[in-house]
Amino acid sequence: MTDPATDWLLVIDLQPAFSHPESPWFTPTLAAVSQRISSLVPLYGRRVLFTRFVPPTMAVGSWVAYYLKWPFALEASSAWLWEVDAPWSGYLSIASHTFSKWIPEVFNRFAPEARVVLCGVSTDCCVLATALAAVDSGVAVRVVVDACAAKTEAAQVAALGIMAARAPQLMLVTTADEIARMTD
């Protein structure tokens, strides 16, 4: 039997870029999701890591076309979008300019046999990319479906369908499931 007291909570990209209505990447369902995340964070104590999407200093490869589509992200006036949202600004965070947050700085924080619980935004992009990369590196992943937000319901359902097919390496759970598991 595995011990949930060794699991890590990885919270993906809770930042104004996705939570603030003035951002072009605003995700309307993130406010409700943030409330659920608030109930999860205390359960993990010091085993919580927040990630932040940040634009690169210089776009290369396919990122050039991406930032031609989203030029606001490279403007200095957008710097406020890249910090962790206020309720969690005191927690440890790691920044990345990639969709997947399963970067060496994150992987190295977890033991090779770690189990990771994921939540955050956007289910169909950064959460999906992170979950698949983590599974690929041999980590057992639990994605808290009602603590993840996508821009649309269709995108949410499609991403969860892709992740559901990765069981048993990747399990889909609810906030209630995680609270029960962590408090038993």
Image: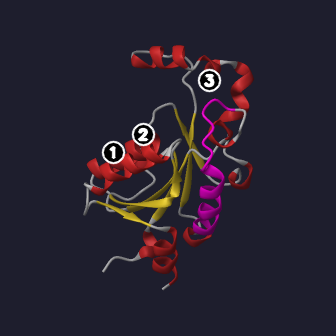
Which mark, by number, is residue 98? Answer: none
Please tell me in which quadrant of the rendered image residue 91 appears.
bottom right
Q: Which of 176 and 63 is in front in this view?
A: 176
Q: Say what secondary structure mark 2 lies in.
A: loop
Q: Which amino acid does label 2 sit on?
A: Ser
Q: Say what secondary structure mark 1 lies in.
A: helix
Left or right: 68 as drawn, with respect to 88? left
Q: Do the residues labelled 2 and 1 touch (CB within 8 Å)?
A: yes
Estimate the spatial distance between the alpha carbons at disc 2 and disc 3, rounded to whole Å: 18 Å
Q: Mark 3 points at which residue?
A: 73
The percent coordinates of residue 73 (x first, y second) are 62, 23
* Mark 3 residue crowding within 10 angstroms, few (<14) / some (14–19) / many (20+): many
Q: Mark 2 points at which residue?
A: 100
Left or right: 140 as drawn, with respect to 31? left
| Residue name at image x 32 percent, y 47 percent | 132
Estimate the spatial distance between the alpha carbons at disc 3 and disc 1, rounded to whole Å: 25 Å
Q: Do the residues labelled 2 and 3 touch (CB within 8 Å)?
A: no
The percent coordinates of residue 80 (x first, y second) are 73, 33
Q: Which mark is nearer the camera, 2 or 3?
A: 3
Estimate the spatial distance between the alpha carbons at disc 2 and disc 1, rounded to whole Å: 7 Å
Q: Give, as a single range, the part of the protein colored magenta.
A: 23-41
Q: What residue type is labelled 3?
A: Ala
Which mark, by number, is residue 133? Answer: 1
- Is residue 101 something that shows in the picture? no
The percent coordinates of residue 57 (x first, y second) are 57, 19
> First in sequence: mark 2 or mark 3?
3
Q: Does the magenta stretch include residue 134?
A: no
